[in-house]
Amino acid sequence: MNWLRIKELVRKEFIQLFRDKRNRVTLFVAPFIQMLVFGYVVNYDIRNINVALVDHSYTYESRKLVDTFEGSNIFHITHYATNDDQMEELLLRGKVDMGIKIGPDFAGTIRKGQTASIQIIADGSMSNMASMRMAYTASVIEKFNLDTIRELYPQQMSYGKIDARIRTWYNPNLDSQYFFVPGIVAFLIMLISLLLTSIAIIREKEAGTMEQLIVTPLKASELIIGKTIPYIIISLAQLSAIIVVAIYWFEIPLKGSIILLFFAACLFLLSTLGVGLFISTISATQQQAMMTTFFFIMPFFMLSGFVFPIANMPTFVQWLTYLNPLRYFLVIIRGIFLKGVALEVLWPQFLALAILGGLVFSGAILRFKKRLD
């Protein structure tokens, strides 16, 4: 293997990449924009719940319930409806997230020492958000019940109870960005490396220079290595820049070894570059290669556990996720970022990435050799 020939091919590839101004935007600007957009948009934290209120009681008790909701700093009574139809219209138009209806007998029932009922209607078009809003609602109602009991029965009551000291490790404030931002880092590396590699060979074919490369003294293995090294360097450089953004802009702690993280990224790139080379061998044009790339990206994204927990998927689909390299890289990057764990904990994920990467990259090379012959 002649490394001088590989070096010149790598130099040619960099010149070809940076000559096109559109590639400069794709390589340097797009990842930062995607990082900022994903980092702020992909968020499950609920900080504002707009509520429509129908209060037929107009009593001290109903006002106290409303104050309990508004005192949480999450619920905001934005609309006061006079009947059910108005509340339904507000929910239908998406102007409120929830509706609360207090009946006329609410205060009288409580004063009798009985259980009073209120109606809570939540917009369930987004099931995850609706379930979280209902959980917040249950906690507010529980607080109202405890305050009401203390007010009605002010005497000291002593009874056995459990004192739960709850601590949330690795993400004390349960901030969604701690979960999503490391995953975004992995997703962007996969996206850029797949897209660039998938069109690397096709670009040579469309430019009419593929035949020239074939007749050069370059061996097939040297041609593949020379074509992939630039994208490895670019991907690792982008990984470095995105990690800096994650740490200093989003303030995500990096508790583990950054060297181990880059080692995992190299194993991960074996799979993505191998898939990109395979796409190059089966595509005839750059447009076809890009469409095929997105065909791979969506299953990788959906079956990785980035957004949807793998444990909630059907059993057959869970088995398919073992073929997804992004699944293992997400575990590694979140473990290194948030938990600070090392190889003695993450070795199964490293082993899986090494096996998948070796198989995919080897298969792409064999396929590529056949196309050269």
Image: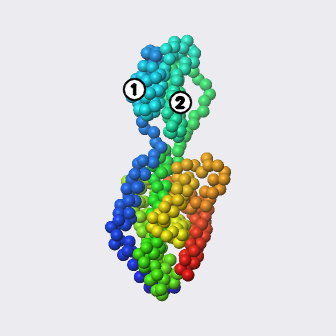
Direction from residue 157 to residue 17 in the image, left or right: left
Name the residue tied to disc 1. Answer: 79
Q: Is residue 50 left or right of residue 272?
A: left
Q: Tell me residue 313's x, y (percent).
A: 62, 49
Rendered position, 290 above or below 308? below
Task: Estimate the spatial distance between the alpha carbons at disc 2 and disc 1, rounded to whole Å.
Answer: 21 Å
Is the C terminus in the top left, top right, bottom left or bottom right quadrant? bottom right
**Most distant residue in the right direction:** 315
The answer to which of 338 and 287 lies nearer the viewer is 287
Look at the image and tell me whether residue 281 can be seen.
yes
Locate residue 168, reporting x and y percent.
53, 44
Residue lying farthest to the bottom in this orientation = 217
Mark 2: which secondary structure? helix
* Residue shown at 46% from the left, 72% from the top: 202
Q: Residue at x 52, y 50 (%)?
A: 307
Q: Residue at x 62, y 59 (%)?
A: 322
- Residue 74 in view (yes/no): no
Tell me the residue that label 2 is attached to: 138
Whether residue 215 is situated above or below residue 344 in the rendered picture: below
Residue 192: where, in percent of width, then height? 45, 63
Q: Cβ–Cβ below 8 Å for labels 2 and 1?
A: no
Give left or right: position of 145 versus 52: right
User: Taking 83 as reference, is 316 above or below it?
Assistant: below
Q: The disc labelled 2 sits on which kind of residue? A: Ala
The one nearer the camera, 165 or 101, is 101
**Mark 1 residue type:** His
Using a 10 Å C-alpha cutoff, classify the residue at mark 1 as few (fewer than 14 neighbours), some (14 to 19) or many (20 or more): some
